[in-house]
C-alpha cells in the first residue's frame, strides 16, 4: 500500500476567532502534526476563494449564512465570507507544521462554483487534478483529517473512494460544523462508501 496523508483546510478562518470558525477547530493541529510526521508523503488542501465568491451569503440578497440555495450545479450552503485568497484567514494555522508538504491543493478559486472536495468541485465533475496526481505517483491509499469533518473532509473521502482509492478518515483529528444533522448524515455516507473511520489510537 502506498499512502498519502491529506491535511484538509487547517486554516485560520476555520479555527476559533476565524470567519467560519469550527468549534474546537484548532484542536486538530497537534494530532495532524503527529500524523504528518508519521507518513512519508504529505499533501495539504487550502480553501482559497476570490472576493465575492458565489458561496458567500453576502452575494445573495435576502439569504443568510448557513442556509441553502440552488445553484446551476445543485444545492449549495451559503457561508460567511471566508478564506479570501491571500488573507490571514486563508493562511494555515501558524502551529501547523507544513514543512514536509509535497503538494498544496487550492480549491474554491472559481467565483461561480464552490469546491469542498480535494478531488472535484461541487458539480462533482470538474477535477482539481488530485486523482491524476496521486495515480501518476503510484498512491493507492489516502489517510485524511482536518476541517470540517462533515464538509471538506467528508466530500474528499467520498471522492477518494469514487476515484478508486482506499481511504481512512481520522475522526479525532477532525472537527465538524454539524449543520442540520450533517455530521451524522455524512458519517453514514462515508461508512456506506467504504471509508474506514479511525481514531489516532486505532490507526
Ligand atoms: C469548508 C465550508 C466552506 C470546509 C470550506 O473546509 O469544510 N466548509 N468552505
Ligand atoms: Zn469555502
Image: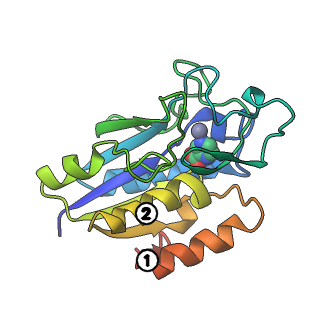
Q: Which percent across, then down, holds residue 116?
A: 52, 48
Q: Give the label on residue 193, or none.
A: 1
Quadrant containing the C terminus in the rendered view: bottom left
Image point (82%, 29%), residue name: 61
Answer few, some or many: residues within 10 Å of disc 2's Cα (few below 14, many 20 plus, some between 14 and 19).
Answer: many
Name the side, left or right, on which 161 lies relative to 73. Answer: left
Q: Quadrant of residue 39?
A: bottom left
Determine whether the beta carbon of the residue marked 2 sits less than 8 angstroms from the nearest atom of ligand 1.
no
Q: Secondary structure at mark 2?
A: helix
Give the residue drawn at x 33%, y 55%: 5
Circle 1 sits in a helix, a strand or a loop, which is it?
loop
Give left or right: position of 27 versus 116.
right
The foreground one among 55 and 105 is 55
* Colour mode of the rendering: rainbow
Residue at the spot of label 2 = 157
Q: Nearer the viewer, residue 191 or 8?
A: 191
Q: Which of the 4 quarters of the picture holds residue 189?
A: bottom right
* Whether residue 100 is visible: no
Q: Estimate the x, y position of residue 37 in percent, counting from the top left.
A: 33, 51
Q: Is residue 65 above or below residue 199?
A: above
Mark pair 1, 2: CA separation: 9 Å
Asked if labels 2 and 1 touch by Cβ distance under 8 angstroms, the answer is yes
Relative to 128, 82 lies left or right: right
Q: Residue at x 37, y 50 (%)?
A: 119
Identify the mark at residue 109; answer none if there is no mark.
none
Q: How many marks?
A: 2
Q: Position of residue 145 (x, y in %)?
A: 48, 57
- Relative to 183, say whether 50 is above or below: above
Residue 173 appears left or right of 138: right
Amino acid at each position: 500500500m502506498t499512502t498519502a496523508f491529506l491535511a484538509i483546510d487547517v486554516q485560520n478562518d476555520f479555527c476559533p476567532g476565524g470567519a467560519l470558525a469550527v468549534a474546537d477547530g484548532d484542536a486538530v493541529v497537534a494530532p495532524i502534526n503527529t500524523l504528518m510526521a508519521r507518513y512519508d508523503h504529505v499533501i495539504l488542501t487550502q480553501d482559497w476563494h476570490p472576493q465575492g465568491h458565489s458561496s458567500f451569503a453576502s452575494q445573495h440578497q435576502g439569504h443568510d449564512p448557513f442556509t441553502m440555495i440552488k445553484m446551476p450545479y445543485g444545492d449549495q450552503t451559503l457561508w460567511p465570507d471566508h478564506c479570501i485568497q491571500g488573507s490571514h484567514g486563508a493562511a494555515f494555522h501558524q502551529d501547523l507544521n507544513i514543512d514536509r508538504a509535497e503538494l498544496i491543493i487550492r480549491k474554491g478559486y472559481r467565483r461561480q462554483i464552490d469546491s469542498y472536495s480535494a478531488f472535484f468541485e461541487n458539480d462533482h465533475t470538474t477535477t482539481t487534478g488530485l486523482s491524476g496526481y496521486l495515480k501518476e505517483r503510484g498512491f493507492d491509499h489516502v489517510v485524511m483529517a482536518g476541517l470540517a469533518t462533515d464538509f471538506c473532509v467528508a466530500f474528499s473521502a467520498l471522492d477518494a473512494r469514487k476515484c478508486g482509492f482506499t481511504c481512512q478518515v481520522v475522526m479525532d483529528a477532525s472537527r465538524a460544523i454539524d449543520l442540520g444533522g450533517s455530521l451524522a448524515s455524512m458519517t453514514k455516507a462515508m461508512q456506506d462508501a467504504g471509508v474506514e473511520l479511525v481514531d489516532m489510537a486505532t490507526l
